[in-house]
Image (tube, coloured by chain):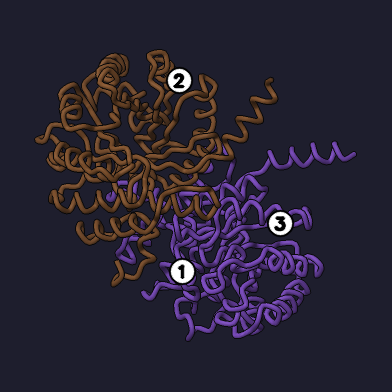
Chain colours: A brown, B purple
Amino acid sequence: MNDCADIKKEALRNMRSLVIHEVGMRDGLQIEKQMVPLEIKKSWLEKLLDSGVQVLQIGSFVHPEKVPQMNTTDDLVSHFISLEDQNTLLSGLVLNERGLDRGLRCGVELFCMGVSASNTHSRKNTGMSTEEALERIMNMADTALAEKKRVQLSVQSAFGCGFEGVIPPERILYIIEEYLSRGFMDISLADTAGKADPRQAAKLIEGVYNLSETFNLTCHFHNTYGAGFANCLAAWDAGVSTFETAFGGLGGCPFTKTTGGNVCTEDLVNLFRRMEIPTAVDIGPLIKVTSEAADFFGREMSGFLYKTVPADER
Amino acid sequence: MNDCADIKKEALRNMRSLVIHEVGMRDGLQIEKQMVPLEIKKSWLEKLLDSGVQVLQIGSFVHPEKVPQMNTTDDLVSHFISLEDQNTLLSGLVLNERGLDRGLRCGVELFCMGVSASNTHSRKNTGMSTEEALERIMNMADTALAEKKRVQLSVQSAFGCGFEGVIPPERILYIIEEYLSRGFMDISLADTAGKADPRQAAKLIEGVYNLSETFNLTCHFHNTYGAGFANCLAAWDAGVSTFETAFGGLGGCPFTKTTGGNVCTEDLVNLFRRMEIPTAVDIGPLIKVTSEAADFFGREMSGFLYKTVPADER
């Protein structure tokens, strides 16, 4: 019986393919001072949909005065949710009840919310302790679930904190146990401060899977010290199939001390393809968006792959 | 007996520490158009020695008209070889018999030479086929050995070629067998075109260790698509302890179509330290050299770590 279960588990693991939750339009653009016009955002989102990413984050529901770049999220969700021919799950990041209401009104399919495992980071980011924030977002998540929405709950600073340093794994496991006990089965571990290393990541993920194997685990690594790919690969080997990444490697968290861009979507897909790990994501449209973003912002993106496309073909 | 050998092997593997062959002064500077004055090179080399890297490549013995930046190699070797208090092995890259003579005259301790596993790359680089180049450099290596020098022989384009694409592993293994059969025990696999991926690298290295386990294997990865760290980690897990890397991630090969910087020494040391893999190399002096090089060349280096040092402390 146990042997059989093991064989099945092994077979399932070998059947995995790389799944991308593209977060560049949120975790990338939110720190960009130069406003991207709505029509350009739309054209980038169209290309991101063309790439076949499985989940696409449209933006966050933050107060428009706090992050003006995100003031288009409602309109963009409304627009893309009305398209009949798209198979991608559209997600939005929600920070509070007001944002949740906005997300429900415009039709977000996957609500992303989370708490920081670091009390210091949590307070700086939300004004609440981890414990307070945890209770609050689980109540918000209940509301979304009651509306038949999908919800992904994250643990930020899961691999360490720019303020507190090492976060004991027990704190991360405690938060995940709370999520699981309330029935939330989509969980993301975020390396908010870019502190993860491959060994530590593998160990933490192993610990998480020891709690339960019947939920979806996503990892969101940053590339602060260039270890993004090595972390993704370690997480993949530990059983994680879904990664939150950003085209061009855009982004970083403005609220932490040490910061760095996201893992670059097209570079990660390219690397996994070279390792013959199956994925449904096309690189072409991603390179196109990254090249356009590089032109728009007038600077080089941190992603590697788009630079191999001759400038006049971008 | 076999069990005992396995236990011993495992124990030896667990006792390993990260060894750095710093090649920035050669593989980094050789493509820089802006000439670095001798005194600045000296001060960078002093800091690199301070960092405790185990092997330090001073430069290449190429014709000064072909690569003017390397016209200081002989003087630099003579200078640093005369210092009594340094424990680092000083290496130099040698491309032909004339370079070998120069290296022998100024006192290089480790001679690096190699052939490309790609015939196309070999012809473009040296005007000779792999087979012709192989015979030539092994004769040169014999001369260096006869002079009681250490020799490291490399296989360039070992993980793929910008011109030929995939290079069959048999070709790499053939070259290594030739090296081993002639008694050369220091061998380096170079990802000249930045084509390696972690799975392929691990598999190739496994194949190499199947030939013999009684030689020193070094890997030289580039960071073309950002996979440098993931490749180093895969190689480490496969048994490789020594890596050729460059401070700041300087460099790239000017003779291949797709190119990219080297793996950044201080970033790699930092990542391995975070994974609690022991190394004798200090990060501080490396960050200092990288910061000075960034100032000197007036541009950002690709390395991550030095950017975390405040500008006024660099």
Q: Amino acid at mark 2?
A: Leu
Task: Estimate the x, y position of residue A258 in percent, counting from the top left.
Answer: 33, 39
In the rendered structure, the residue with mark 1 lies on which chain? B
The front one of B84 and B239 is: B239
Q: Amino acid at mark 1?
A: Thr
What residue is shown with label 3? B216
Is residue B141 shown left or right of residue B26? Answer: right
The front one of B58 and A69 is: A69
Asked if labels 1 and 3 share a chain, the reply is: yes
What residue is shown with label 2? A173
Task: Estimate the x, y position of residue B270 in percent, counting from the top left.
Answer: 48, 44
Is residue A225 shown left or right of residue B76? Answer: left
Task: Estimate the x, y position of residue A68 in percent, counting from the top left.
Answer: 12, 40
What residue is shown with label 1? B258
Q: Amino acid at mark 3?
A: Asn
The front one of A93 and B22 is: A93
Residue depicted at x 30% and y 31%: A110
Give above or below for A115 relative to A242: above
Per the image, label 3 sits on a secondary structure element best described as strand
Task: Estimate the x, y position of residue A106 in percent, counting from the top left.
Answer: 17, 32
**Rendered image quadrant of residue B79:** bottom right
Give above or below for A298 relative to B102: above
